[in-house]
Image: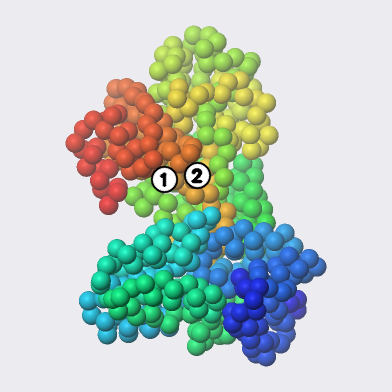
Amino acid sequence: MSASIVAAHGAHDGSRANQAVEELVRALNHGMPAARFRPAFNLGRPTFGECAPGIEPGTVVLPLFMSEGYFVQQRIAPVFGASGAAVAPALGLQPGVLAPVLQRALSTIASQRGAVVVVLGHGARRHAGNAAATRAFADTLRATTRRSVRVAYLDQMPSLSDVLERCGDARIVLVPLLLGGGAHERDDIPRLIAKRTAPTTVVSATLLDHPQLTDRVEMLWQTARKRYPLRLGTRGSKLALWQARYVAQRLVDVGVPTRIVVIETVGDRDVDRPIELFDTAGPFTDDLEDALSAGTIDLAVHSLKDLPVRADLLGSVAAVPVRGPVGETLVSRDGRTLADLPSGARIGTSSPRRAAQICWHRSDLCLLPIRGNVERRVAQVLSGRYDATVLAAAGLERIGLAARIAERFPIEAFVPQAGQGALAVQIRPDDWFARAVCSRIDAPAIRRAVRAELRFAHTIEQLGRVAAASAVSSDDQLQLHAAIIGPEDGSYRHGSFIGSDEGAVVSEAVRSLVGSTAAVSALAEVDS
């Protein structure tokens, strides 16, 4: 069996943290000599870069970190993933691993009635993932104690100094959620709380002091050996397989082995019936979600726009990777643009959204239903059955049919479906392992944009309207292009909205395009 890597941050000064990791490795090798564990450090020897070359594919790497943050996602996963290693989730995300810390914190809080509780994490301004375990632990404390719990960080805002200052003369219970043993615990925290005159009780929360740390690391190793490779479910169309292979490669690059499982959906089996006549909102996703629930697959890759718009929005979506082109295109038999098509030209579309926008631009065209995957629709146009059809740019580019595009519509003029161009990697909601490792390929800016689109679409859908939206993020500003098609009269209203606050931008779009009390109430229900 190949050697397994225990990866830690470490320190150049040979601190207690480095020694504790080395002691942990010795204990693991004593208990599981066949696994042959060895340490690797960001600071200290041997380094990640020194350990990665020459390791055998399938070697398990165990990140001794609190969260899937900068060091796991930017340093460990790419370095070892490129060598074919299987990188497990960060230790701090494993269920139950923080239970002793929680019990120590609860015991201290109970004895310090009236004290303000502050959870301190390391955090890092360079990667939002560094704060994940801290926030989750604080949420658990709030739910368990039903008391106010504040969060502070050593390397991002709000800083510990700021939080302590806001607490004034109140008594404080400080829970440092750190891996432990290093300069932060030895020097930084005592220095910061020494300035206070009010009582401050520091809970011993060092993860390296975990009474069953060796058992927990062994359990993480066993879980990774059992779960990898993750089974990635997909439809069998050319586009769906491209998308699945793209996601699979992205995951392999960050140390997540996968294998693809093809699942036929009801939408694939019935290619003639119009989509609106199916008795489900998810003809292309239901069978994949059923396979997830049954445990047949671990992940499902969808075109995000195929997922039914739900109140929980992206709750079961563990990753929204880098997005493809968002816009719509025209594929025509003879290369003509929409403006150049002759009056009465036959346009194939089964989308009320696309139909309404085509009619808004050209009310003299003949709209006819069309079904089938992207290749089939293009073939039906080229064969002369239709003069043109409207298709997503992302799908055409992904399967090598970009040369068939006669016209690319500006988003402002032809608003695409919410989520278009984006992929969704869906998991079982309670699968912590899959959620952790899939976060390595999540694109937070794309997730934010798509979430705004879905919030808008869900709000309008609740009012019985057909809606479409597209959002892009630039310089931390969210720009939402939104459109509403009247369900009865086919009226078409659209506009662009921009701002830094997602909720405010969506609210402005709803009020501007619908302008009713019912719309505002529906948006409030989505936000709640």
Q: Which residue is located at x 24 percent, y 37 percent?
A: 519
Q: Position of residue 276 (x, y in %)?
A: 40, 36
Q: Nearer the viewer, residue 83 or 403?
A: 83
Above or below residue 236? Residue 184 is below
Quarter-of-image position of residue 140: bottom left
Inspect the image, locate mark 2, and give the three-letter code of the amino acid beneath it.
Answer: Ile
Visible residue check, residue 187: yes
Q: Which residue is located at x 59 percent, y 82 percent?
A: 16
Q: Secondary structure at mark 1?
A: helix
Q: Residue furthest right?
A: 54
According to the picture, the residue beneath numbered tag 2 turns out to be 446
Q: Nearer the viewer, residue 176 or 324?
A: 176
Q: Residue furthest bottom?
A: 30
Above or below residue 485? Residue 56 is below
Q: Position of residue 125 (x, y in %)?
A: 50, 56
Q: Nearer the viewer, residue 477 or 234?
A: 477
Q: Position of residue 376 (x, y in %)?
A: 61, 32
Q: Which residue is located at x 38 percent, y 83 percent?
A: 104
Q: Which residue is located at x 54 percent, y 61 percent?
A: 69
Inspect the image, locate mark 1, and give the three-letter code of the amino acid beneath it.
Answer: Arg
According to the picture, the residue beneath numbered tag 1 turns out to be 451
Crowd tier of the residue under label 2, counting other residues whose Cα lies within 10 Å: few below 14, some 14–19, many 20 or above: many
Q: Position of residue 107 (x, y in %)?
A: 32, 85
Above or below residue 504? Residue 233 is below
- How far apart marks 2 and 1 lie (CA) works out to 8 Å
Q: Please name the colour scheme applied to the rendered image.
A: rainbow
Quarter in which the N terminus is drawn:
bottom right
Q: Secondary structure at mark 2?
A: helix
217 sits left or right of 508 in the view: right
Q: Give the mark nearer the N terminus: 2 vs 1.
A: 2
Q: Nearer the viewer, residue 13 or 81?
A: 13
Visible residue check, residue 293: no
